[in-house]
Each structure stands twice: as C-alpha cells, then as structure tokens.
Amino acid sequence: MPRPADGRKRVVVESVEPQIDAGRFPVKRIVGDTVRVEADVFADGHDHVAARLLFRYCDVPQWTTVPMQPLGNDRWRGEFSVSRLGEYLYTVSGVIDHFDTWRSDLEMRIAAGQDIAVDLLNGAQLVEEAAARAGRDDADALRRWAAQIRNEEKPEAAQAAALDPALAATMAHYPDPALETCCEPELRVSVDREKARYSAWYEMFPRSAAMEPGRRGTFRDVEARLDYVAGLGFDVLYLPPIHPIGRSFRKGRNNAETAAPGDPGSPWAIGSEEGGHTAIHPELGTLEDFHHLLQAAAARGLELALDIAFQCSPDHPWVREHPQWFKHRADGSIQYAENPPKKYQDIYPLDFESADWLALWDALRDVFLFWIEQGVRIFRVDNPHTKAFPFWEWCLGEIKRDFPDALFLSEAFTRPRVMQRLARLGFSQSYTYFTWRNTKQEIAEYSTELTQTPLREYLRPNLWPSTPDILPEALQIGGRAAFLARLVLAATLGPSYGIYGPAFELGEHEPLRAGSEEYLQSEKYELRHWNLDAPESLAGAITSVNRARRENAALHANHNLHFHATDNPSLIAYSKSSFDASNTVLVVVNLDAAHTQAGWINLELDALRLRPGETFQLWDQLSGARFLWQGPRNYIELSPEKMPAHLFRVLRRVRSEKDFDYYQ
Amino acid sequence: MPRPADGRKRVVVESVEPQIDAGRFPVKRIVGDTVRVEADVFADGHDHVAARLLFRYCDVPQWTTVPMQPLGNDRWRGEFSVSRLGEYLYTVSGVIDHFDTWRSDLEMRIAAGQDIAVDLLNGAQLVEEAAARAGRDDADALRRWAAQIRNEEKPEAAQAAALDPALAATMAHYPDPALETCCEPELRVSVDREKARYSAWYEMFPRSAAMEPGRRGTFRDVEARLDYVAGLGFDVLYLPPIHPIGRSFRKGRNNAETAAPGDPGSPWAIGSEEGGHTAIHPELGTLEDFHHLLQAAAARGLELALDIAFQCSPDHPWVREHPQWFKHRADGSIQYAENPPKKYQDIYPLDFESADWLALWDALRDVFLFWIEQGVRIFRVDNPHTKAFPFWEWCLGEIKRDFPDALFLSEAFTRPRVMQRLARLGFSQSYTYFTWRNTKQEIAEYSTELTQTPLREYLRPNLWPSTPDILPEALQIGGRAAFLARLVLAATLGPSYGIYGPAFELGEHEPLRAGSEEYLQSEKYELRHWNLDAPESLAGAITSVNRARRENAALHANHNLHFHATDNPSLIAYSKSSFDASNTVLVVVNLDAAHTQAGWINLELDALRLRPGETFQLWDQLSGARFLWQGPRNYIELSPEKMPAHLFRVLRRVRSEKDFDYYQ
C-alpha cells in the first residue's frame, strides 16, 4: 500500500456538485450565469476546516479563490460567475483552519474563566506563521497583532487583540497551503452565449418560399419572407439542407420509390455532380446570394441555422473521391442505408469504422468550418446518433475552441442514453420527446426530468410540436385547439422551442396515410405553396406567445419549472421564475382539444413567492385579461374555441387602501 | 482537441454499478457472494452491441469474461462470484456485434422475400475474420461454416448454415477486440470473511469478570466466563483495552477528577511504565495467559476482538521516546486532549500533523501487527474519526494485504460524512446511530438508508442498544420491555449487533445523573461485580434471539430489509429474506415499553414472496407460537410484560385437503 506524498493532509473534499460522470464532461452555462458549487469538506477530529472554491478561465493559469460557506452536515457552498465564452475550470479545496479553531476554543476558555496565558502564546505562534506567508502589509499587521497577544504585561489588551475580528479576517487569507487538499480531478464548465439556452426557431424550406404558386423558391424569396418570420417573433431561421440533391434513386412525391420528371428530391439526399456539403443547390442561388440572405436576416434579428446531415447521395463527389469512407458489400458495391427489410438506396451512410477515419473526420469538421467562414454560427445536426460518439466529441471541441459562439442542435430522436451522451459530448441543444408527450402526467414527468434532475446540467431541450418528419397524432386529430395548446406548451415548458412553418401556423394536419406520422404532400419530396394570409393562420397567436416569452424573463430559464396540482386531468398548470425572482409566470393549459374544461387549481404559493394571505393579480400575457386571486385554491375555465391556455404574469403588488396617502 | 487513439471504437460504456466515488474506493462483499454488475452499453446507429463483464482476483493477471444480458433501455447486467479473501477487479466492455447485426438483418430480409445472395457473402466474410481470431478447433469449424455460406450452388444449405444457432454461439466468443471499449477506471471489490457482515458481539470488562465480589478479574476469569457467553449465542467476545493504565491525572470512580487510592483508572488511558499498546496490564495476566484465553475462546466458537485506542496516558512510553508524535504547547508541555472548556488531562492525543508522521504511522500499524501475531483478527477501533483519514486508508490496506481475514469495527459516533468516509477507507463494520433511533419513523428511515441506498455497498452496520459510554434514554426509562425491544431490533434490523454485558442482560439502567448517558458506577472507572444468576437476567431471551439469528439465513444479510405498514405508531413491522429466498422472517416489535399495543399490519405480500390468496403460517422463533394468516391485513397484539416482539419465520407451505393421498 503506497503512502500518500504528504499524509498530514487531513481534510477530505468529496461529492462536489455540479459534476458529470466524475468530471469526464463539462457542465453547461450561459455567459453571465452563476455557477453554484457545493462539496462535502471535513476532517478528522474537532478542528475547524475552511473550504474554498477555486476557478479560472481555461487559458488563465491563476486560480481565483472564493471562500465557501458551511451549510451544515459538512456541506459547503460557494459560487462564481462566468463572463466569457469557452471553458472554465473549477475545483474545491479544504484546509484545517488552526487559527479559527484556536480562536473559538479561546472564547470558550474565557467564558469558563480558565487561565489562557499559554493559549495566548499558542495563538501568537499561529499568527507569526501566517505572517511569514503574507504579503508585506498584512505581514506587518499580523506581527503587530502577535506582539500584542504575546505581551504578558497587558493581558487584557492581549486578549482583545486575540479576539479582534480584523485579525480573524486577515488570518482567513493565509491558510497553510502545505496541508491543503484539492478535489481531483478539476471540473469544467462550458460557457455558451444566451441563444444556447433561450431561442425561438422557425424552420422553413427555401424552395417553397416563392410568393407565386409553382415557382421554385430561392434565397431571394427567403429574404422576402424575413419580415414575416421576424414579425412572428422568432430569432433563429432554420433551413433544411441547401446543397445539390442527388439524382440516383431520387424519391418522388409522397416518398414514392421513383421520382417523376421534375420532382425535386429530398434535400437530405445530399450531393450531385454540382457538389456536396459545401456547395449550394444552384436553383437556390449563389454563395453571394447566401451571404446577402445572412445579412438581411441579421438586420432583422434573425440568425440563420443550417442543417448538417452527414450522409451522401450516390452522386456525391465523396463517393468517387473517397470510396474508402463508405462500407462496401461483398460484391464491391457501396452499402446504401437500410433498416432491413427497408432500403434507402438514395442514401449512402458514412462508415465511421473506415480505416481512413482520420481523413474522414477532418473532412466532416471542414464542412462546419466552411459554413462558419460564410458567417453561419448555428447548426442543426441531422441524426447525430448514427455517427460515432468519439467523432462528435472531437469535432465539436475543435470547432468551439476557435468559435466558442458556435451552437449545435442535436436532432437525435432515439433512446434516452444516446440522446444524453450526445448532449454531454458537446451539443448545445437537443430535440426531445416533447413531441409525443400529450397528457398531464406525461408532460409533468418528462418536463420534471429535463429541469429538475442532473440532466439540466448538460441537456438543453428544444421543444418542437412538429417537424417535417413528425406530424404527431395530437395535431392530426386535435384541430386548431391542439395546435394552440402545443404551441403554448412548447414555448413555455422550456426556454427554447421551434415550429416547422408555415405548415404549423397554417394547421397542416393530413397524414400520408392513417397511422403514419408523415405529412401528406410532404415538403421533403415536393415544392409547396403556402398562403400566409389564410384566415385560419395562427400567426397572431404565435406573435403573442413570442412577445410574452421576450417580456417575461422567467421563460428564458430552464431550472425553475414547478407543476401545481389541479383537480381536472385535462388542466395542466405550472409556474416558472426568473433567476433574480423578479418575474414569475403561471401557465395553465387545457389539454382537451374537444371540450371546455374547468376546475380548481391548488397553487403552491412558495413556488410563486407568494405569502399565504397575499392577494395577487394574474395578468394574462396572451389575452390581456386580469384576475385577482388569493390563496392556493382558484378556479380555471378554458375553452378550446379561442385560446386553450392562460399565460399569466404573477403580479404580487396589489393596490389596497393602504396605498392611499391619507391612509397613514 | 486531441483525437482518441482509435476513433473507430464506437461503443460507450458508462454508469457502471456498483461503483463508489468513481472507483476511488472498493465495494465490499463476503466470500461466496455474487457481485451483480450493471452498466449502460450502447453505440451509435442500429448495430447490435455485445457487453461483457470482466473480472479477476487482484494478483491474477488474466481477466475472466462473462457475457452480460440486456435489460432494456441500453442497460446490461452480468454477475460473478467472489471465492477468495482480498480484492477483485472488475470492469465492463462493449463491442459492436457485427455478426449478430448481420444475422438479425438476414432474418428480416428472408422474411421479406429479398434476394440475399450478396448478404450471404458479407456474412461469410465476418465468419472468416472471426476464424482468424479463434483457437484452432473453433477456427476450423468457423471456416467450414463460412464455406457453406459461400456455396452459391446450394443456397438453401447456405441459408441454413448462416442461421445455425451453433454458429451464432461460436461467433459470440470472438468479437473484434480492436474496436472494444472498456470502462475506465477498473473497479474494485474488497472481499471479507462472513463475520464482517454477520456477527454477534459481546463486550465485557475482564477486570470485572471475577466470580467473587471485590477481586480483580483476570484473563483466567474471562476464560471461566466463556461458556456463559458462548451459551448466550455470541460469536465475538470484545474486550476493552487490556494495556497498562496511566497513573497521571487518573480518573476516579464516576469519572471523578482525581482517583482515590486503589481506583483502577480507565482502560482507555493507555500506557504506563509497564508498557503501552503492545503490553498487557500486569493484573490481567501474561501474554501466555492471553494466548490461552484466545484458544479457549476459539474452542467455544468465540473469536476475541481487541480494542485499539490510539491515544496515550502521560505515562505511556511513547511520550518519553517519541515526544515529536504529540503536539506541544507554547510553554513546552504536551497538549492534553480537550474539548474546550473541558480538559482530559489523562489523555494525550497523537499529532497526525507531526513532521515525524512516517514513523508514527509505522508504529501504529505495528500495534495491529503485534496483536495479529498473537492470533487476534478482529479489532474494535476506538474513535477512528480523531485520527487522520489518509492514515487509515494506508494502515488498513497494509494489514489486509497480508491478513485479509482481519476485521475492523469503526467506533465513530460522529457526523454522517465522517462515518461514511471511514467505512469507505476500509473499516469492515461501523457503529451506527441505531443507539438513538427509537420511534417507528426514526428506525424505518435510518434502517432504509443503511440497507437500500449506496451506503450498503460499503458501510456494514453493527447495531448496539448500549455501550459503556452510552446508556440511552430509552433504556434508562423503559425497563425490561425496553431492553427486550431494543435487543430484538438490534439483532434483526442488521446482521451484526452487539451488547455491552453483563450490564445489558442485567438491565443496568441508572445514569450518572439526570440528563447524562453515562452509567452510574461505570465500569470504565471501577471494578464491578455482576450476579449472572439474577432472576431478572435477560440471558434466556438473548439466547433465543441468537438462536433465531443462526437458524434464519434471512437475518445474515443486509440487502433485504422491507418495512410493512401498521396502523399503530407503536408497532413496527419489517421482513427480510435470504439471498436464495429460501428463508423469510417477519419481525413485529411493540415500541411502547409501557402499554400493550394492538393493531393491524398491512403486509406487502410481494416482499414476503407470498401470492395474494395464499394461506401462510407464521412461526414465532422466540415463543414457539404459530399463527395461520391469509392476505395482507392481519391483527397483532404485543404486551410489554413478557416479550414485546414477534420474530416470525414465514412458512409458505400450509397443509390443506390437497395434501391427502386420497384427494386426487
């Protein structure tokens, strides 16, 4: 059994939180966030310990230290804030605080009337030792204190000096570093910009953006659509792949096995003789047009997100140039994608077991870097769960090192462990199972998991009521009320959400066939023309919801979701508060798209920061209506006809007679 | 961002359980135990993975591998048993199972009527690759299979060979190790003999063992007491320190500040001119007498446990020989123990911050080794929480390396984190807070924490109703019924327990003064004479309880405690089952020492392995009474007069008319 280097380090530091997989992965924060760190710090015996939180930005060698405060039961807490994009390191240290132990013992001896002559000399020695570790000014002051404490001729002054709070405060800066224990390993925080947590996405197919029916939309048409999207209140405009589309085995309308002449093909069948992942489909425009679109979007507060789908059509240049990046069948042909017995012959997956994996990794990273060079900073990554995990950790790390403002949304609709691993590996946001969570219990359980378990340290949810691949049953059958309810849920259960438009705001709900989640006439396989001015459009409601999100800081956070009981299973109620507690919202949604539902809500007033007897005002951010409530039990009635949800801001200060000047 | 050595290792292994502090400490098991290991093992995409559990005894270089079984949701389970004392290592590996993926795809292709000619060739290639990794016999067999699969002239035989279960079974032995992922770091299991988990301790002061009042007891008197202790059913006889006792500042009777002439002093004030921690108090006997006692005890199934208290009286030889092992005050005197304003001038603590810590550590380890050389293998360690943690980890590791049968009971009545740390550092058993847990809720909560949380992987409780230092309120005021209830609780809530005798069986309950937990006329400071034949002795009940413990394997385990609801707060009910489920006990205790209590118990039949409608027999192992019960709801009535507890064995097989030969 080897001995430790210094067996006199008596302090233990353990159970540091937050911490993911023993420090294997960083926790995630946003610029300006506070990182609250807790740890168990203790030693043998009765000596007092002091715990300190140490942190530093990754390329700064010096640690900054913060004293931690005891919470009881050997738990300590400290915090620091992160002000820069990139990675911070933190750790916790503990040391025996001999001076504090001595001082507290001394107080008890004095109270018991004991002789403290020798104790004073013991203490003076501790102060002199600290003086040797201190900077000049403090060292001088400490030596003066020590001399006073040693002065046996003036015992009262000696005692006063010993207990001087200023001495204790100075001593706290100079623990003996030789016997300090540091937590191993150092832990990491990955810091992103705010959009990593709080964002509103609008997805649209550029080729369906033309104003006139039948014409193929271009980047210029998307530009013409920007005011509309910005007016709805979104801040990310996400485009499906914009690259040349393969011709071999091209899919036709409604996912037909063979395309008819003129069928445009799926944008996810990437690559043709015109180029691959760094080329633009010639019918959408030029790279110059793309730059113009980026700037026009930015001018309206819209950031462009590109879809990165690492798969190739058989016509992709890589198939010719790097056949070793694909798996080959025994007959020498390249293995197409399949999920036996289904075959997807228009798609070749990349082989992450290729002997040439180093070059493959470089090429994939360079796709991101190419678009970053063009000015893109947000990527929606298609099916990351079908690419090797080690690749993502390396690739995202490489890019973030130089572009810490880059954001990556993981489109992994797969098993929980896989989704969680991708989030830990570095994806900034993740699609979720929200799309299929419809009932009160399902929504409450899943949202609680996302916001109240260690998941919240690294998996940032992005909630989508639907996507071009998924028209969920609830929207197929629920009509306008279901769309509105799912909109409000997505926009308020998490700080990031997105809609696939204009299909969503126009209530598109016909499936390809019964039992399918594919859209009939899916835009994936054909051009569509959308009438944005249709009277049934939900544009107005969406605009209100996005305005409410902007104006209520409680909806920008993901740590703070609290469900409140209702006596009706169709009524779900939850509240959120901003970090500084200045803003609180209460959301109530009628989950029954068919009937008016009414019932009693039983508020947990603590979660709303309300006192038991307090009267408070609820101000509906969607309808503008206001209600006066008091106490936990209150009545709710929501009809599916108009808006099946309340999005209340909770106003604590209700005027009363006491507010009149003459009340006093 | 560095790339991994081989980025093609696509499998992730994470969340391996059991695991303590990311593998920093071993989990604990008993010889013959099964170690059940679970892990999340998964990869990107749709390929099947295979997970294996690897384990080895610490000094065996080769791993043994066991296939793990999928539990769903990417969780896998495997197990191995530990047959040797000492340390085992284990880890989990995962690999893409290309053959299994291919085989399962092939079945779906065949079911869909697809052409499988090329697929068969793909598979033959996989089989040939495995043949290259296999031993000669398997390699030959695999090549024969591959040839059959490749034979295009006999497509039906090729298909049959491809799907041959024997081929799949053989292939499972030869995954491609190049792309295998192993969990880092390797995890450890520390394996003790059974007494580490299951033991019944009897503590007694040798100096009070004389048959005649007034005479000082010796090792020979202890020998004369062995039949009595063994007859009670205990298997560990624990003696407080047997070393010479200091004279300086010796405490008198009832902890008086000064000893009267003839007062024997506290056995924990260790060391005098006659010697220190490796010497025997001359009035107890010689080393030869001690050896004789050890053997006599062993002959009766009793193992001796010694008390190791690392502290010194001012007369201890170390004070003279190694003054640097003690802390010095500013006036040059050695710092005595204190808890200001209380002073314990008869005790000098050791200074674990001594510059000479290396020699101090050696000396302390050598104390254990000295007594191990004499034949002792069980140590009750006094106040380990006032000695440095790094010392314990090193010292216990040093000793267990050479004497893996050595056991250490941690007497740390202190804060939870400290107790837990000591258990993780290597102590085999721990005193607990049981001594102060009296109400139904207190007992259920604490026992659940000890048996149903990760604590159970490393902290083995040893439950004591009282100790020479602690006469708890419940025993001061509750009389005989309280002693019996606490006895049954201690002996059945955990597999290890102990009593401080003969004080316990004779119902000693007078405190030094009101509000104190010290005994009046404590044996710590004076000789006592005990009348073992007193009619009020609980010896009979203790003998029954220990017999019931021996005869019911359910009471030898610590993983299996389950509380059942009762409608009376004074009635507590819990069950335990043996590992192999062949033995189940149900314990019901009346916690009210003053009144008969009755009520309804609501059994969870699952925990008792009973079917809902089944009739079962309860056989009280203490009184011999038998009851027939059916269903969850049953009546209990317990009087404090005789025995305020049932200790039922649950007998599932109740005879009925169907057992008669002529019933058929």
Image (cartoon, coloured by chain):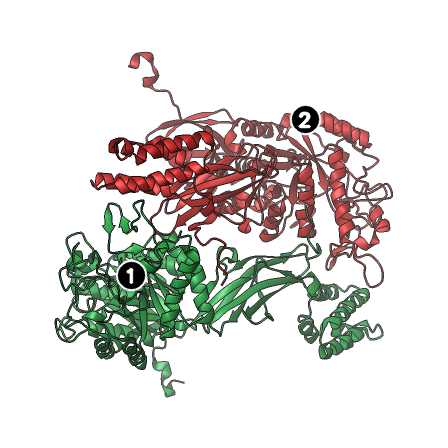
Chain colours: A green, B red
Q: Is A620 left or right of A38, judged from the image as shown?
A: left
Task: Give the percent coordinates (x, y) of residue B317.
Answer: 85, 46
Hey, which quadrant is residue B427 in on the image? top right
Residue A619 visible in the snapshot: no
Q: Nearer the viewer, residue B513 or B457?
A: B457
Task: Please name the amino acid that badge 1 sits on.
Answer: His
Q: Residue at x 34, y 77 (%)?
A: A654
Q: Is A552 left or right of A252, judged from the image as shown?
A: right
Task: Give the percent coordinates (x, y) of residue B552.
Answer: 51, 28
Q: Residues within 10 Å of mark 1 (few under 14, many from 20)?
A: many
Task: Please name the amino acid that badge 2 sits on.
Answer: Tyr
Q: Nearer the viewer, residue B130 or B28?
A: B130
Q: Which residue is mark 2?
A: B228
Q: Residue furthest top?
A: B662
Chain of the residue under label 2: B
Chain of the residue under label 1: A
Which label number is shown at residue B614? none
Q: Is B482 left or right of A363, judged from the image as shown?
A: right
Task: Give the percent coordinates (x, y) of residue A223.
Answer: 24, 78
Q: Is A389 left or right of B192, judged from the image as shown?
A: left
Q: Which residue is mark 1?
A: A316
Hey, which quadrant is residue A642 in on the image? bottom left
Q: Nearer the viewer, residue A233 or A274?
A: A274
Against B233, is A147 above or below? below
Q: What distance separates the C-alpha of mark 1 from that of mark 2? A: 89 Å
* Secondary structure at numbered mark 2: helix
Q: Residue at x 76, y 69 (%)?
A: A129
Quarter of the C terminus of chain B within the rendering? top left
